Image: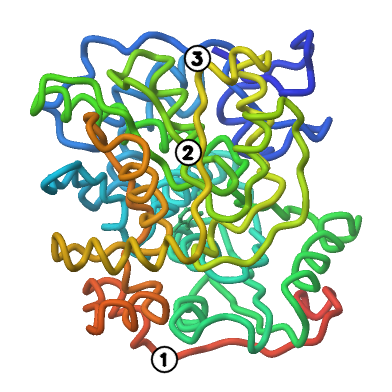
Amino acid sequence: MYYYSTRDKNRDIKLTASQAILKGLAADGGLFVPSQLPTLSKSVSLELDYPTFAYETLKPFFEGDELLDELLDICKGAFNFPVELRELKDTSVLELFHGPTSAFKDFGARFLSFSMEKLLVKKGEKLCILVATSGDTGGAVASAFHKRQNLSVKVLFPKGRVAERQRRQLTCWDDNISSYEVRGSFDDCQRMVKSAFVDPELKNLSSANSINLGRLLPQMVYYVYASMLYQKRCGKKPVIIVPSGNVGNCTGAFWAKAIGAPIERIVLAVNANTTIPEYLSSGVYRPRDSVKTLANAMDVGAPSNMERLFNLFDSYEKMKENVTAYSVSDEEIKKTIKDEYAKEGYVLCPHTACAERVRLDHFNSEPTIIVSTAHPAKFETVVEPLINKTVEMPPALAKLVNMPSTFTEIGTDYKELFK
Ligand SMILES: *Cc1c(COP(=O)(O)O)cnc(C)c1O
């Protein structure tokens, strides 16, 4: 097993999983993908606890890698919270929000931080992770890297432009995590991070963004797990509907299906950012600026992981055969949250509502799993007025938002980060 860049058609440069994880982005600007998608081993069984299940699923992807002997430990550290496949009347819901920041990004961010920690401690090296965030990602990364050895994190967020509950999740940390409130926009924050990366004086900087292989691989595991569990319960292969933005989460699902997970079909539910459904109906891929929606973690007009899907399905015909996508408007998101609460007493976050809308409109009579990417309490300003009720925060999230805030306010010069 080795990893190569999506832009290296002849596979001239071969990296191990560990090398790809530490590098993040390939030198040619492409994304790392596995040299093969090995068939699921018989040892992957629902009898196992989730961390061991993850270990058995991921083992072939670390064949010959320096982390192989530590992979079980990494899985035990990273996946210390439940994965639940909840049954509603008409569908199952894969709840990926039981981690420390109540969103699916906890899986990838934690697997990445535990993997990096092992590698750095062995090498006796240190890394500083820079993250610019407009909300969700920063919290998951800060939480995942908190107290990991040989790692530190600097989180940058724009002053006055993140929701209060999100701001609290970005500023409740101590130890190796520092938060910076930037007097500027999210674009300024991103620009500062980019400038720091190209400054030759600054060494040992890295990122933890969603294109890192270390975030992708663990996102495959819960699809293997959920589809096996579904098949065991219902005797059928499910259609899995994934709320999608940068398409990292659904790439995990496509890899899971490719290694033999019992999945009938993978469907992307997107918001009013219609780049992918338009491509599938026209054959012309046209990335663009994003538009703002209520499902804001999916406000992406140029999905960065599309490059991995183009690598997996290397013609328009194959793409059309394997990928289905539908767009959901803000009005439909609101209606779906309201109706679902009235009908089932189940509260959806705006992202999950996109998946449920797609299910109702297109897959109503089929066996389905909708993926729930976040707990509704993270988006209380959208959800609560619609259902006329306070959404109780999960205990882990409540703990975070009630901690005291510590942060440094700075201007838009990246050098202030390193004073
Ligand atoms: C990041 C995120 C998404 C989109 O996931 P991608 O991997 O970017 O497609 C969906 N829902 C929530 C809650 C998210 O935080």
Query: In the rendered image, which residue does mark 3 sit on?
Result: 64
Front residue of this view, candidates 187 and 65 = 187
Judge depth for marks 3 and 2 and give the one in front.
2
Some atom of ligand 1 lies within 8 Å of the CB belonging to the residue at label 1: no
What residue lies at 38% left-to-right and 72% top-to-bottom? 378
Residue 133: name its quadrant.
Answer: bottom right
Judge depth for marks 2 and 1 and give the one in front.
2
On screen, residue 333 above or below 392 = above
Name the mark on residue 404: 1
Q: Earlier in the sequence, mark 3 or mark 2?
A: 3
What residue lies at 69% left-to-right and 38% top-to-bottom? 23
Give the image location of residue 288, x and y in percent: 77, 49
Give the image location of residue 184, x and y in percent: 78, 83
Distance between the alpha carbons at the discs numbered 3 and 1: 45 Å
- Estimate how packed mark 3 is, as few (under 14), some (14 to 19) or many (20 or more) residues with alpha carbons within 10 Å: some
Type of amino acid at the residue the image marks with label 3: Gly
Q: Secondary structure at mark 2?
A: strand
What residue lies at 32% left-to-right and 73% top-to-bottom? 377
Type of amino acid at the residue the image marks with label 1: Pro
Front residue of this view, candidates 419 and 180 = 180
Query: In the rendered image, which residue does mark 2 sit on?
Result: 268
Distance between the alpha carbons at the discs numbered 2 and 1: 38 Å
Q: Can you say which quadrant of the picture contains the C terminus?
A: bottom right
